[in-house]
Each structure stands twice: as C-alpha cells, then as structure tokens.
Image (cartoon, grey):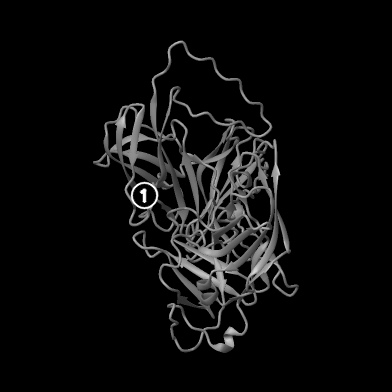
Amino acid sequence: MIRTTMIFAAAACVTAAGLPAISAQAAEKPVLRLITASKTATADRYEGEPAVYLNLGAYIAADRPWELRVKRPSYARKPVVYQRIGGKDRKLPAGLVDDFSGLPDFLKLSIRSTDGKIEQKLSQTFCPLGPSSRIKKEAVATNKYPDSCSYNPFTLGSVWGIQKGWAVNTASGYYGPAPASADLPAGTYDVAVSVAKKYRKLFRIGGGTKHVRLTVRLIQNQDAQGRKRAAGAALKAVRPTGKPRIPKGPRPDLRALPAYGIAISQDETGAIPMPPMPGMPTPAPAPAPAVPAPVHDYLQFAANVWNAGPSPLIVDGFRRGRQGLMDGYQYFYDTRGKQVGYQRTGQFEWDPRPGHEHWHFKDFATYRLLGADRKLIVRSQKEAFCLAATDAIDLTVKGAKWKPSNTDLATACGDVTSLSVREVLDVGQGDTYTQTLPGQSFDISALKNGTYYIQVIANPKHRLIERSTGNNVSYRKVILGGVPGARTVRVPKVGIVDAP
C-alpha cells in the first residue's frame, strides 16, 4: 500500500524502457530516496539454520507523498498498479506486480567478503508497508497506511504508501516479504545496496548505492523460542438502551472467498494434536491402543469471509449472569460514524478448550463439502467464530479501514472473566479460518474418488443485517484421488489464481 505524489511531465511521453517520462525539472529532486540507518549491521546465524536473514537497516524515504493503488480487475487477470497523483490515478506499466506482497526484485544486494573469497548477488521484494519511522520533525505524527502487505491469494485491492517525511524499512519481516537470506558463514562482509534501475526511473528514486559493513555471528546451542500471545483484554461494549431499530443507511456486506490452502491429512486416531498454550504443561502421551484405530483421511482447507462495506460489522456480546453465554447485538452507524441503531442477533459462547479459551460468535459462516451435483455430502462442525481482521482483502472499497485494531484473537475475543466483548470486521478486511481439526476439516475416508466442491457460506441464517446476501456463497472445486490412507487432491485454478 503505497502513496505516491510524483510530478510527471505534462506530456505523456514514454521512454525507451516503456516508463512514463518526467520533466528535467521534476527529476532534479527525487520523490523517494534510499537511505541507511548505519554504516554497519549485524546478523545472527543460528546453529543448524541454512541461511541468515539480512536486515541491513536500508530504508526508502519519501521527500514527497507517495501512494500506489493495486487492484485486481478479476481473478482472471493480474493486479494492475495505479499511482495516485493529485487525487487522480495514473496507470503504471502492466506486469509490474504478480500479487499483493510488494514490488518484486526491488532491492539489489551485492555481498562480498572482506577477503574477497565470497561474492553473492541477491534481489529482494519490497513491501512499502513494513516497519516505518518518521524522519523529519515536521512530518505528520502517525502513519495512516496499513501495517502489512497481503498474502491472501484472493485479495482484490490494496493501498501502498509512504508519507512525506517518513521512511519504510526494506526488510519487512513479519510485515511483508521476508528479508533477503544468504548462506554466509561467520565473518565480515561489504554489502552494496541499491534500487533496481526500472524502479529508480519509474518512481524517481535517489540515494545511489549504499555500502554497509555486515558482521555475521554464529549463535550456538540456541533453542527456538515460541512467541507468546498476549492475553489481550476484550474491547468493552455498552449495553444498548432504547428500542431496537434497524435504520436506513450504510450496512456491512459480507462476502465469501473461495477456499484455499487445501490439503489431505491422515491420523490414526482421527485427531490432529494441538500444541499446548504458552505456560501450560505438555500433556503426557496417551497409551497406544491394543488394536490400532483405522486411518482416516481428512480434507483440510482455509476459508475467508470479508466485509465489502461500506459500513463495519460490529457485534457486541453481553454475558448472561455467570453463564458461558452472551447475548449478541449488531450495531448500525451513519456515514459520519455515529451509532444510529441496533438489533438483537444470535449469541456468543465460551469455548473452554485448550488452544481456544475465548468467546465465539455463532453462525457467522458455514462450511460444507458438496458432491459433483452440489448436494451436501459432509458439513463442518465449525460454526462459531471470534472475528478478527486477519487479511486485508480490498482496501480500495469505500470506507475501507487501513489500520484495524483487532488483527488477531488476542485483541478481540475476551477471556473467561469478560462481562462483554466487541467483535468487529472492518470494511475491506477479511477473517480467515484454517480448518485442520477433525469435525472442522472434512472426513473423506468413505468418499469415492471424483469431483467435489467446498462451499463457504457467510451469514448462513441471515441473522446479521447486511447490504446484500447475493454474494454470501463461494464454491471451490476439488478432485479427490488415491487410495484410503493415501488420498490425493487436485485443485483447479480460479481464473489465473493458482492457490490450492
């Protein structure tokens, strides 16, 4: 998601490279610059790891506002990139990006050991939504752009940007593409960092080539440390007063994306072990049964329901005394964001299972496996959800929220002591669930080989009020093969999107 305010020549002339030309006057001052935070950097290579990740402290800084809009016309086409200049969108050369993860082959790294024996050349994708910093005291105080690029294969639109006086680290890590990695032994290296020529010309990027002295350290006997999830407190809702009312005005619009991440798993007990939560003791292994249970084949998948807006989906839950149930209410807002109504809708339930231990809103979505005739074969037991903005699906739609606050289960789902919870699915954002557990994934052990469809239904009982229910269902074709205990699945493309 990149904001770009570049000054192009008034004449729409084109260079030999096929890129829009810019006047000599505009070219005098770059829009963007490559800068480095330090002349030195250190990278730790852990024993047993095949490579070391290179965070060289290289940033892309904006001397003027810079923004790109990335849109996919359909799943049959690659994304198209537009540069927003003066409130208008200028279409950039076709084929600039293949997906929504960033600008490919943006950064060029030339690595050379100080003794001259090792030399490597690498390219790195740049996500302009990575870790950002304000570098000028007069710049705006907060970054308005999203925190990460999207990796959902069915993303439709995104906004990439760097505000004037801000800089974005080219080594995104968690926020985007992984930093470049290299098979380097412990030692000292000179790394030459530059931006690829086509991007320097297209976006008027200055700064030339930067040199960083890199020290690689070998770290021995280090165990991988699991990341602990903070037990975030739920957002507290205010119990509604007055008569329920469903006003006219903006509403959410829930849409089901095609399933992806489709695979076959087998387990003799019919259960996939779940790792213990941080701080919980690891349970003792169960004794082996005298007679092994039959092998089951499971069809796993991921499913996403997103909100095309123009209004957020906001559902509050209020506890029924000391029960493990909450009454659910949907809230409605006008174009200025003022609450103007509410209605009673469904309920929340407490899920005490290890690995869950949070409040679920029931009937948000339903997953089914259908036969070739699209008649029900198997239904997933997953019907209760903790809503979170896990994936940005289309940040170009009206009312899209670029920086949602509830991006994981720890920020939205409450705990056993909660009296109320608020679960939100902002405009442009989607919530992905991966169905890997028996009962959630489909048991296909007794199914014949052939064609089936994974059906995803949003708002299956129409308990939520939304703009349209005509786009609430998606289908993903799968073709089962193999033999029991070794089943296979083939997943055709959706348009040009190859996301099995």
Which residue, as the protein is rendered here, is positioned at the far right? 137
Kindly indicate the quadrant of the structure image that contains residue 278. Answer: top right
Residue at x-position 44% and y-position 45%: 303
* Viewer-side residue, 171 vs 120: 120
Q: What SS does tag 1 mark?
A: strand
User: Is 329 above or below relative to 55?
Assistant: above
Q: Is 22 displayed left or right of 259 in the figure?
A: right
Image coordinates of residue 315 in percent, x first then y, are 55, 49
| Residue 118 shows in this picture | yes
* Viewer-side residue, 357 vs 155: 155
* Viewer-side residue, 481 vs 401: 481
Characterize the local packing of mark 1: few (<14), some (14-19) or many (20 or more) Cα atoms within 10 angstroms.
Answer: many
Residue under pointer 1: 473
Residue at x-position 46% and y-position 45%: 364
| Residue 244 shows in this picture | no
User: Is 196 above or below relative to 8?
Assistant: above
Which residue, as the protein is rendered here, is positioned at the far left? 373
* Viewer-side residue, 124 vs 191: 191
User: Is 400 above or below relative to 184?
Assistant: below
Residue at x-position 40% and y-position 49%: 499
Image coordinates of residue 308 in percent, x first then y, are 46, 59
Which residue, as the protein is rendered here, is positioned at the far top? 290
Residue at x-position 61% and y-position 79%: 30
Image coordinates of residue 199 in percent, x first then y, are 52, 72
Task: Give amino acid for label 1.
Answer: Val
